[in-house]
Amino acid sequence: MSENLIPVYLAGDLVFRPEALALFAKLKSICAEYGLDGVAPFDGQAEARLLPPGRETILAFVRADRDLMDRCAAGLFCIDPFRRSPEMDPGTAVEIGYMMGLGKPMEAYTVDGRLYSEKVETYWRDVLKQDLRKREESDAPSSGSMEDPDGMLVHSEGLLQNGMVEGFIGMAGGQVSIHEDFFQAFRKAAERLSLRLQARI
């Protein structure tokens, strides 16, 4: 981690994307413009990456990522839909929960500004060729008015992602920055986080 820069954890499905190291290098460069030291998951995985693929290797990655989150002052989270589904990368959602538990500031960003319910509706219609339907009265509190053909509630109406994700980001003082250009979305989130962290100094 660089001196005089505030270390922030860079999370999302980015580790699975093509040319991931080059992508993180660009994000780190943007972070530095705002006085932040972008810390990628790969930064703590040097030893683990020497291991063959398998259970022990991925668990070593998990431990390394947890240690990085412990050391960072805050987090920047990509919440783009993952593998063409409505949902974000589940590992990133876990990391958001972990950093919420640590009480650290967070910001999120995405290139997809559609509401979560719209993403679910589009997925069912375009991929599975079925439509959502209105949810009949239920004996449980509801965070949505529609359900999918399996009878599962389309929850978190009015939000971009699962309410626990966006809710925790908001409870940590952040918001979701949206821009159709990935790097511009990231830049907006990095700038917001920098201003918040600098105000604490």
Image (spheres, grey):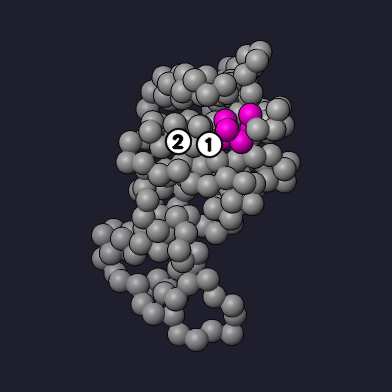
* Left or right: residue 145 compared with residue 170: left
In the image, what residue type sits under mark 1?
A: Arg
Q: Is residue 26 visible?
A: yes
The residue lying at 59 percent from left, 80 percent from top is 140
Please tell me how crowded label 1 is: few (under 14), some (14-19), or many (20+) other residues with Cα within 10 Å: some
- How far separated are the C-alphas under marks 1 and 2? 6 Å
Q: Which residue is mark 2?
A: 188
* Left or right: residue 5 compared with residue 103: left
Quarter of the image containing the C terminus?
A: top right
Q: Under tag 2, what secondary structure?
A: helix
The span shown in magenta is 193-198
In the image, what residue type sits under mark 2?
A: Lys
Q: Are marks 1 and 2 in contact (CB under 8 Å)?
A: yes
User: Where residue 70 appears, x then y in whole percent?
Assistant: 72, 32
> Residue 192 bears which disc, if any?
1
The residue lying at 54 percent from left, 53 percent from top is 166
The residue lying at 59 percent from left, 77 percent from top is 141
Instruction: Pick whichever, 116 or 123, lies toward us.
Output: 116
User: Where residue 124 appears, x then y in whole percent?
Assistant: 33, 63
Q: Under tag 1, what secondary structure?
A: helix
Tell whether position 115 is magenta: no
Q: Considering the whole magenta stretch, tell me its main secondary structure.
A: helix
